[in-house]
Image: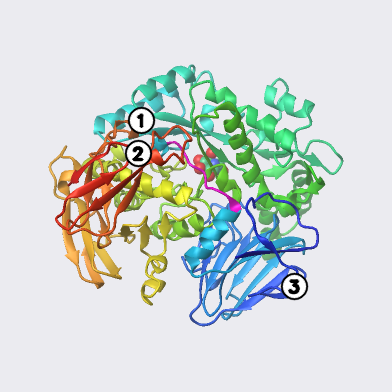
C-alpha cells in the first residue's frame, strides 16, 4: 500500500503518475521532526537499499548522501552527490518500508552516518511530498513504487549492442576508421558515439561541415554496416547572433531568466550560453523540436550531457572573481590567501550562488532554479522524449541522459558519467546497478574502461566482462587519455570473444530487460532479493542477479586470477572464452560445472567470462553476430538443466516498434523430465539444447 502526505507547498515534479492513498494522520515508520526533517531508527540488522546513482555499496548504510545533481567527475568514496537525484530508498529491518521523497531541491539522507542506528532525511525547504510504501518484501515494495512512477523507458533493440565512444572523434574519416577497424578485428559493434567535436563551435543541432561534410551520407554508409551514429546534445545554447537556435530561443522567450528578467548568461563549452527553460512546457516543445534536425540526417539515438546543468562560470561570478583577484595582487600570499585565491577560480564552477540567480517560468509561476535544481536534466530529456513521440510515434529512439530525477526514467536511460579507469570503479559500476533499477532506471551503464585516466588492457578486459551484462554497453573515454578502442590492444581475440558473448546472450538479456520494464521489475537485483532467507546472501556486495536465471560475480581486482564467489544454492558454473582457437565461435568454448552451495574460489582468466545458472532455470542464447541486426533470434540454443525445472518466458519483438504488450512476443519454454524442449507461442522460435 502506498500512502502520500504533503508538507507546505510542494512543487509538482510530475514524477508520480500512479495511484496512492492520501494520509491525514501521523506518518507510519518515520518520525516527523518538522522543517522537512524525518527520521527512524535502524536496528542492527537493517539493510537500506536505494538512492540510485550514488557512491558506495548496495547497502547504503554508513554514509551521508546529498542528492543534488552535480557535474562531479570525482566519483570518490566520499562523494555525497553525483549527477542524479533519486530520492527513493527501502529500509529492510525490524521495520520494512519504502520512502520516496518527492522534492526537487537538495535532499540529505543520513543513513547511519551521524549515528549508525538512525536514518535521517532532510529537505532543504519544508515543502515536499512523501510516499510511504509497505509490503511483504523489498521487491514487493519496489514493484509498487515503480507502478507509482510509471513504466521505464525502452530503447530500440540495436541499443543493446556494443557501442564505441570517445571524446575526440574529430572527423568523419576518424569515425569511418573506428568502424572499419572493428569490422576488421571481427569485434561486434552497433554504435559509434559522437562527442562535442562533431558540432560547429559546440553549438547544439549544428554539424561541423569541414569535419563532417555529409552526416547523412556517413550515417547511411555506417548503417549499411550495422552501425549507428549517436550524437551528444549539450544543455547550453551558444549565444551567437545568426545561430538560429539562439535567435529563436530569445525571440520566443524560451531561455531561463535572471533576476532582472533578462536571459540568464552562463558559460559552458562554447563560452557564453543560455539555458533552455525546459521546466516550461512551451520551451520544452521548442527545444525538443530541434532534435528533428539530426533525425532527418539518419540519426536514431542521442545522449544528453551537461544537464545538471553544469556551469563553468556565470557572467556575474566572473566579474566578482576578477574584482577579487586584483585585491590579492599586492598581498603576501600565505596559507589563507593562497587558498582563497585558488578557491576563487575553482569556485566559479557549478556555484550554488549561480544556481540561485536564475529562474524558470513554470505553469505554477516563476520559480528560482535552486529550488527545482534536480529537475533540469529530467526535463531536458523529457523535451527530447516528448519530441520523439511526436516526430517518430511508431519507432523507438535511443535516448539517455547524464543528469536525472525519478520520472525521467520514463523518457530515457542514463549513463553514470565521468568515472575513472580505476579498478574500484568496476565494483562501483556493479553496486550502482540495482540501486538505479529500483528507481526505474533500467537502461543504464558506465563508461566501460573508465572515462578519466589511462586504462590498461587487463582493466578493460575485466570491465568488459561486467559490461556485457549492462543494458547500455558502451566504451567511452576522455580526450587526452590513453585510447581504449578494443582493437588497439594486443589481445584482440580476447575482446572479440567477450563482446561476441554479449550477442550470444542477447536473447536472454533482452528478454529479461523487457520483462523488467513491462512488469515494473528489476533487471539487476541484489542477491538478497532472490534469496531472502539466506543471511549471508543478504550481505553480498559484489555479486548480482541478472534477470531470473543468472548470477554474476565479476573479477574487479588487479592481477587477481579469479575470486571468491558465494553460491546461495547449487548452481552451474558456465564458462566462456579461454583457450579457444582464433576465429572460433565463442558459443563453442562453453564449459559447465555443477557446484555445491557455499564459498568457492573460482579461477577466471583475463580472456574468460563466467556466470552462474540457477538450478532448474534456463538461458536462451543465439549464435551471435557482428551487430544486433545479424543475430538470429529465431533459432536459439538453450543453456540449463535437461532434467527439467522452471518454465521460461522468452520475450522477443522486432526491436523497433512500440507494440510491447502484444502477447505474440511471448514464447513459453518448458523442459520435461526426459529433457525434451517444448515451446508455446506464435513467434515460431526453434529451440534446441546447446
Ligand atoms: O565536462 O563532452 O560526461 O561523457 O565526453 C566534460 C565531453 C563534458 C562530460 C561527459 C563526457 C563527455 C564530456 N562531457
Residue 621: give x, y in percent of width and height: 26, 45
Q: Which residue is mark 3?
A: 25
| Magenta region | 149-156
Image quadrant in which you'd find residue 172: top left
Label at residue 485: 2
Left or right: where 112 falls relative to 642: right
Instruction: Count every numbered label the image shows and give the total.
Output: 3
Marks 1,3: beta carbons within 8 A? no
In terms of sequence position, does the residue under pointer 1 or pointer 3 come before the other? Answer: 3
Give neighbour class at mark 3: few <14, some 14-19, many 20+ (Cα, 10 Å): few
Q: Does dot 1 land on a helix, a strand or a loop?
A: helix
Q: Taking the image as drawn, is residue 540 in sight?
A: yes
Q: Is residue 388 above or below residue 440?
A: above
Q: Nearer the viewer, mark 1 or mark 3?
A: 3
If the image is split into quadrants, where does the N terminus sit? bottom right
Label at residue 408: none
How much space separates mark 2 and mark 1, taking CA atoms?
8 Å
Residue 178: give x, y in percent of width and height: 36, 30
**Mark 2 sits near ligand 1, with its Cβ under 8 Å away:** no
Front in this rendered view, residue 676 or 444 = 676
Amino acid at each position: 500500500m502506498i500512502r502520500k502526505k504533503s508538507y507546505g507547498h510542494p512543487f509538482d515534479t510530475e514524477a508520480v503518475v500512479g495511484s496512492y492513498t492520501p494520509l491525514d494522520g501521523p506518518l507510519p515508520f518515520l518520525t516527523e521532526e518538522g522543517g522537512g526533517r524525518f527520521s527512524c531508527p535502524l536496528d542492527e540488522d537493517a539493510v537500506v537499499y536505494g538512492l540510485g546513482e550514488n557512491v558506495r555499496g548496495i547497502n547504503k548504510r554508513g554514509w551521508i548522501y546529498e542528492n543534488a545533481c552535480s557535474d562531479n567527475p570525482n566519483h570518490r568514496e566520499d562523494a555525497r552527490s553525483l549527477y542524479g537525484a533519486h530520492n527513493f530508498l527501502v529500509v529492510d529491518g525490524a521495520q520494512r518500508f519504502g520512502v520516496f521523497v518527492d522534492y526537487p531541491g537538495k535532499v540529505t539522507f543520513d543513513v547511519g552516518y551521524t549515528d549508525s542506528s538512525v536514518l535521517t532525511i532532510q529537505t532543504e525547504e519544508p515543502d515536499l511530498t512523501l510516499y510511504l510504501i509497505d509490503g511483504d518484501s523489498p521487491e514487493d515494495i519496489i514493484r509498487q513504487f515503480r507502478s507509482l512512477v510509471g513504466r521505464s523507458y525502452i530503447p530500440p533493440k540495436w541499443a543493446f549492442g556494443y557501442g564505441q565512444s570517445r571524446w575526440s572523434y574529430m572527423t568523419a574519416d576518424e569515425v569511418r576508421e573506428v568502424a572499419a577497424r572493428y569490422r576488421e578485428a571481427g569485434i561486434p559493434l552497433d554504435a559509434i558515439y559522437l562527442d562535442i567535436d562533431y558540432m560547429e563551435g559546440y553549438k547544439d543541432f549544428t554539424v561541423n561541415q569541414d569535419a563532417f561534410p555529409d552526416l547523412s551520407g556517413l550515417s547511411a554508409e555506417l548503417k549499411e554496416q550495422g552501425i549507428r551514429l549517436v550524437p551528444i546534445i549539450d544543455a547550453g545554447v551558444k549565444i551567437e547572433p545568426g545561430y538560429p537556435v539562439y535567435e529563436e530561443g530569445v525571440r520566443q522567450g524560451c531561455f531561463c531568466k535572471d533576476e532582472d528578467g533578462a536571459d540568464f548568461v552562463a558559460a559552458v563549452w562554447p563560452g557564453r550560453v543560455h539555458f533552455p527553460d525546459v521546466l516550461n512546457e512551451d520551451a520544452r516543445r521548442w527545444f525538443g523540436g530541434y532534435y528533428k534536425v539530426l533525425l532527418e540526417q539518419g540519426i536514431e539515438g542521442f545522449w544528453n550531457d551537461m544537464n545538471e546543468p553544469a556551469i563553468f562560470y556565470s557572467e556575474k561570478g566572473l566579474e566578482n572573481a576578477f574584482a577579487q583577484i586584483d585585491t590579492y595582487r599586492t598581498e603576501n600570499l600565505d596559507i589563507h590567501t593562497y587558498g582563497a585565491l585558488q578557491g576563487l577560480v575553482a569556485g566559479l564552477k557549478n556555484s550554488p550562488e549561480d544556481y540561485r540567480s536564475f529562474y524558470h517560468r513554470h505553469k505554477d509561476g516563476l520559480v528560482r532554479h535552486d529550488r527545482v535544481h534536480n529537475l533540469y536534466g529530467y526535463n531536458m530529456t523529457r523535451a527530447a522524449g516528448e519530441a520523439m513521440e511526436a516526430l517518430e510515434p511508431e519507432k523507438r529512439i535511443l535516448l539517455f541522459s547524464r543528469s536525472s530525477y525519478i520520472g525521467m526514467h520514463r523518457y530515457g536511460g542514463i549513463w553514470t558519467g565521468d568515472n575513472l579507469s580505476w579498478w574500484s570503479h568496476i565494483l562501483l559500476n556493479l553496486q550502482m546497478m540495482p540501486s538505479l533499477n529500483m528507481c526505474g532506471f533500467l537502461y543504464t551503464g558506465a563508461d566501460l574502461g573508465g572515462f578519466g585516466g589511462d586504462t590498461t588492457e587487463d582493466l578493460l578486459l575485466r570491465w568488459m566482462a561486467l559490461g556485457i551484462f549492462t543494458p547500455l554497453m558502451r566504451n567511452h573515454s576522455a580526450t587526452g587519455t590513453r585510447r581504449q578502442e578494443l582493437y588497439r590492444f594486443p589481445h584482440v581475440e580476447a575482446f572479440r570473444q567477450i563482446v561476441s558473448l554479449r550477442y550470444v546472450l542477447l536473447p536472454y538479456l533482452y528478454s529479461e530487460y523487457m520483462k523488467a520494464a513491462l512488469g515494473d521489475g528489476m533487471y539487476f537485483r541484489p542477491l538478497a532479493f532472490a534469496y531472502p532467507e539466506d543471511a549471508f546472501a543478504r550481505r553480498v556486495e559484489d555479486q548480482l542477479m541478472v534477470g531470473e536465471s543468472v548470477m554474476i560475480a565479476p573479477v574487479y581486482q588487479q592481477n587477481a586470477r579469479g575470486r571468491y564467489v558465494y553460491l546461495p544454492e547449487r548452481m552451474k558454473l558456465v564458462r566462456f572464452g579461454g583457450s579457444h582457437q582464433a576465429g572460433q565461435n565463442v558459443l563453442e568454448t562453453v564449459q559447465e560445472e555443477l557446484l555445491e552451495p557455499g564459498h568457492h574460489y573460482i579461477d577466471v582468466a583475463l580472456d574468460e567470462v563466467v556466470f552462474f545458472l540457477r538450478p532448474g532455470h534456463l538461458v536462451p542464447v543465439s549464435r551471435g553476430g557482428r551487430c544486433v541486426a545479424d543475430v538470429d533470434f529465431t533459432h536459439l540454443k538453450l543453456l540449463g538443466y535437461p532434467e527439467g525445472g522452471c518454465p521460461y518466458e522468452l520475450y522477443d519483438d522486432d526491436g523497433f516498434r512500440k507494440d510491447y504488450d502484444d502477447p505474440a512476443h511471448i514464447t513459453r519454454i518448458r523442459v520435461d523430465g526426459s529433457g525434451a524442449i517444448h515451446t508455446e507461442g506464435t513467434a515460431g522460435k526453434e529451440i534446441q539444447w546447446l
